[in-house]
Amino acid sequence: MKQEYTITVYTENQVGLLVRIAIIFSRRKINIESINSSPSEFESISRFTLVIQETEDVIKKVARQIEKQVEVLKVYYNTNDEIVWQELALYKVSTDEIAEKVQVERLLRQYGARAVAIRKDYTIFETTGHREETQRLIDFLSPYGLIEFVRSARVAIIKASSGFHDKLKEFEAAEPGEEAVENEYLGKREELFTM
């Protein structure tokens, strides 16, 4: 049975990798509902967070296929119960409409919103939470002239994980990196390439 999964991919920071990962989903005709790319706790390692609706068997196959990419260090997949996650949402509404017809303080308290910009022509509110929570505020603001709305991709942390840091230490202990050797020909271009 299909359910919502969050896939976390730790990768080296390489150009073009996101396209190759997206192609893996595209070939299997799997829709990516949300995708986020961000730095991880390590300077040279990036983290992709993808949300999809699929069966566990398909998720396992996709995760193995993603891990075959040279730049991919580790892939995790989790159900919503196994992660802590949030999304950020911004709502732009007419300042006149919202000031006249809504008790703004009640709105802010009830929906956990905060005003991030107040201008004569519009006000922008911000909330964080699960999709259902951010959707409730859309439903509330729509009759009052919701001008614009945007929701971010999911950010998630795995509950049971001790973090990728420990996994990276295991990798390094199992296969230590080679010592850097200086190229003996570096700086000798004219001597080597003469005609």
Image (spheres, helix red, strand yellow):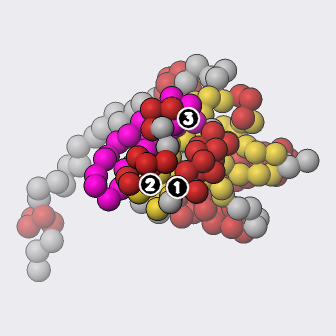
Q: Compare marks 3 and 2 and give the one earlier in the sequence.
A: 2
Q: Tell me which residue sits at (51%, 32%) in the image.
A: 106
Between marks 3 and 2, how big is the CA–CA gap? 18 Å
Q: Badge 1: how crowded within 10 Å, few (<14), some, or many (20+)? A: some
Q: Does the segment drawn in magenta span residue 117?
A: yes
Between marks 3 and 1, how big is the CA–CA gap? 16 Å
Magenta stretch in the rendered image: 107-129
The image quadrant that residue 45 belongs to is top left
Q: Position of residue 35 (x, y in %)?
A: 56, 52
Between marks 1 and 2, how big is the CA–CA gap? 6 Å
* Amino acid type shown at disc 3: Tyr
Location of mark 1 (residue): 144
Q: Is residue 177 visible?
A: no
Marks 1 & 2, CB-CB < 8 Å contact:
yes
The residue tagged with tag 3: helix, strand or loop?
Answer: helix
**Residue farthest along the left direction in this orientation:** 190
Q: Badge 2: how crowded within 10 Å, few (<14), some, or many (20+)? A: some
The residue tagged with tag 1: helix, strand or loop?
Answer: helix
Q: Which mark's residue is nearer the viewer, 3 or 1?
A: 1
Q: Compare marks 1 and 2 and give the one earlier in the sequence.
A: 2
Marks 3 & 1, CB-CB < 8 Å contact:
no
* Amino acid type shown at disc 1: Tyr
Q: Badge 3: how crowded within 10 Å, few (<14), some, or many (20+)? A: some
Marks 3 & 2, CB-CB < 8 Å contact:
no
Q: Tell me which residue sits at (67%, 42%) in the image.
A: 132
Q: Tell me which residue sits at (70%, 39%) in the image.
A: 77
Residue 184 versus residue 165: which sits nearer the camera?
Answer: 165
Question: Vertically, is 108 above or below 182?
Answer: above
Q: Position of residue 27 (x, y in %)?
A: 72, 68
Location of mark 2 (residue): 97
